[in-house]
Image (spheres, rainbow, N blue to C red):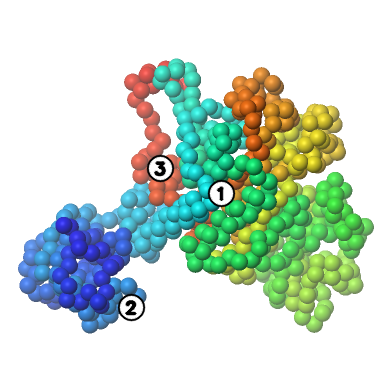
């Protein structure tokens, strides 16, 4: 027997027990002829006391960091207790020990505050995984996995596996493809999601399905994106939108309770896509804090339902200030308590919005001083009375700083959203231990691809329009005759029966009620520019299935890695994946991807054109 207990198990109640531990040497501390060793395993750390009787043996064969050690002895009470450790009130007086394996000197320290950079730790990921900080992330991931399975099992869902080698049906991200040796010149694709399979399972009568499943997308990477990622993939039959929302906000609340000990009892707020874009500038807003966007000016062709409200804006007419008068959109936020910002701080914010990734020309600031007076960077163009009107319109209070951006609609709205989040971060309003959920509903079904002069699916081509708009879609030609007036086309106003769940400004899940009638699905494919032949070639199996009694159905997929990262207080999903890729899509530990030899290429009938 290698061990009787783990390194995180022993307590004062075990004093006097004879035990054997096994693990890795964390530290070695010598005090004359006495040696203390911290022994570590997955479960914790226990201090070992090597007395004078073992000194000669230790001198002959010194123990080093990360040696694999087995040690036996008696549990005793520590004289210098370490209450920071669960085992810190006891230690083991060692009577015998054995080195199970030696270790080379590690390339970085195996502790929470390591001296290893990202690249080095990824190259030696098997060592990085020994660190307590990484171990806690992996444990949290397992806890989320376990809670998910428990909730879905309790609610009648079946875990059903679907294939990884499928047909390439490019629509959205780029596929990873796999050559077939037995079918020369033909290729499988790795699934971007199990979308069509889960719909086929609904046709097959398995009315509650789920998987915690790997998905693959060949796209550029960033902190929250990997070429292979995991999602909680779910589908239900005989449901409407509210059934899905209620079921899966229940799932996230259950995970909060099981993993974080949080009772999320608040009702999950629901907002339409148009409302979140209008009030936050982005379709995944962080609602942990206020600072909503005030719309001083918007284009006539955007936010039709909001035009009357914006008409009351103090800059709705000509102001004599060309930056506002010539802009398509003018938006503002009132930053609480920031009227005290210095000139240097304001200049830094202006430089921040001018960065290429934000792309604005400048930033107007209006200080609403605590005495009620106003001072702005545009005093030359606006009287104090006019500034008072702007302050009232944006709901600013004395002590607030009003920041205004003006420019093209899409860029300006995105910029004000980024500025709001940046200031929320700087002001400490985005607390990592606070969680707020939001459902975003009623997305546009289509987006207009200007370069191609055609419609593309905002989500995916299996998303159903709102029931009241199905006839609009079936009864109209999707062809856009005048590209400049695409917003007047009937398809521009069709809403998707779709929903996203947002947590702390991150989209963690998205789904829809699906199309389940062949006629409507064919109409969707046609709207996306597919000929009947293309649709049959790519999705004939699904269209055929719809002719055999397909039930109404819908579902959702949660980004499992991202959910874990948010719960763990991290910006990067890589911290919660055992063996992640770097930002170039490489596994630097395995040195993959890598070339293959000529024999393999010949077997696959592949010639490289490099």
Which percent across, then down, holds residue 542? 61, 28
Question: Does residue 277 sit above or below 227 in this rendering?
Answer: below
The answer for how far apart the CA atoms under marks 3 and 2 are is 39 Å
Question: Foreground residue, 528 or 224?
Answer: 528
Can the viewer see residue 562?
A: no
Q: Secondary structure at mark 2?
A: loop
Question: Foreground residue, 219 or 212?
Answer: 212
Q: Residue at x 87, y 58 (%)?
A: 310
Name the front one of labels 3 and 2.
Answer: 2
Q: Secondary structure at mark 1?
A: strand
Mark toward the start of the polypeptide (1 vs 3): 1
| Tag 1 residue | 558
| Tag 3 residue | 587
Mark toward the start of the polypeptide (3 vs 2): 2
Determine the residue located farthest toward the right in the rendered image: 317
Q: Residues within 10 Å of mark 1 (few under 14, many from 20)?
A: many
Circle number at residue 83: 2
């Amino acid at each position: 027997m290698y061990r009787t207990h783990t390194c995180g198990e022993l307590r004062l109640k075990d004093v006097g027990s004879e035990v054997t531990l096994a693990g890795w040497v964390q530290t070695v501390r010598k005090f004359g002829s006495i040696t203390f060793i911290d022994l570590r395993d997955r479960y914790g750390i226990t201090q070992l006391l090597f007395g004078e009787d073992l000194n000669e043996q230790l001198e002959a064969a010194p123990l080093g960091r990360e040696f694999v050690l087995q040690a036996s002895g008696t549990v005793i009470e520590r004289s210098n207790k370490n209450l920071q450790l669960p085992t810190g009130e006891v230690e083991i007086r060692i009577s015998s020990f054995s080195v199970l394996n030696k270790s080379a000197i590690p390339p970085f320290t195996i502790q929470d505050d390591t001296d290893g950079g990202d690249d080095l730790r990824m190259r030696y990921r098997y060592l990085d995984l020994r660190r307590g900080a990484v171990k806690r992330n992996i444990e949290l991931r397992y806890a989320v996995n376990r809670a998910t399975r428990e909730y879905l099992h309790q609610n009648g869902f079946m875990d059903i596996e679907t294939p990884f080698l499928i047909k390439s049906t490019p629509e959205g991200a780029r596929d990873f493809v796999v050559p077939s040796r037995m079918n020369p010149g033909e290729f499988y694709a790795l699934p971007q999601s199990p979308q069509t399979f889960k719909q086929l399972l609904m046709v097959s009568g398995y009315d509650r399905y789920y998987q915690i499943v790997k998905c693959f997308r060949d796209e550029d990477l960033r902190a929250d994106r990997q070429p292979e990622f995991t999602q909680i993939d779910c589908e239900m039959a005989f449901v409407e939108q509210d059934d899905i929302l209620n079921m899966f906000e229940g799932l996230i609340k259950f995970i909060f309770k099981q993993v974080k000990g949080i009772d999320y009892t608040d009702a999950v707020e629901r907002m339409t896509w148009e409302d979140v874009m209008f009030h936050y500038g982005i379709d995944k807003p962080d609602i942990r804090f206020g600072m909503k966007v005030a719309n001083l000016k918007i284009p006539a062709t955007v936010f039709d339902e909001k035009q009357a409200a914006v008409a009351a804006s103090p800059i709705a007419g000509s102001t004599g200030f060309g930056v506002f008068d010539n802009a398509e959109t003018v938006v503002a936020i009132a930053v609480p308590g920031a009227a005290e910002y210095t000139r240097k701080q304001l200049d830094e914010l202006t430089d921040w919005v001018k960065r290429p990734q934000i792309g604005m020309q400048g930033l107007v600031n209006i200080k609403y001083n605590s005495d009620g007076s106003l001072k702005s960077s545009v005093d030359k163009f606006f009287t104090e009375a006019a500034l008072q009107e702007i302050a009232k319109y944006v709901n600013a209070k004395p002590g607030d700083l009003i920041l205004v951006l003006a420019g093209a609609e899409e860029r300006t709205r995105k910029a004000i959203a980024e500025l709001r989040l940046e200031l929320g971060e700087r002001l400490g309003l985005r607390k990592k231990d606070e969680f707020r959920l939001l459902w975003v509903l009623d997305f546009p079904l289509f987006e207009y691809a200007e370069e191609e002069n055609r419609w593309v699916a905002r989500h995916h081509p299996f998303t159903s329009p709102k029931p009241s708009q199905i006839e609009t879609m079936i009864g109209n030609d999707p062809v856009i005759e005048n590209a400049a007036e695409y917003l007047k086309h009937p398809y521009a106003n069709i809403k998707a029966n779709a929903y996203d769940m947002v947590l702390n400004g991150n989209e963690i899940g998205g789904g829809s009620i699906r199309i389940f009638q062949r006629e409507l699905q064919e109409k969707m494919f046609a709207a996306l520019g597919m000929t009947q032949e293309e649709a049959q070639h790519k999705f004939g199996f699904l269209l055929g299935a719809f002719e055999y009694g397909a039930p109404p159905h819908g579902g959702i997929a949660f980004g499992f890695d991202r959910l874990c990262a948010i719960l763990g207080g991290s910006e990067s999903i890589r911290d919660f994946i055992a063996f992640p890729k770097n930002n170039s899509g490489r596994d630097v530990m395995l040195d993959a991807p890598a070339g293959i030899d000529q024999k393999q290429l010949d077997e696959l009938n592949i010639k490289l054109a490099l």
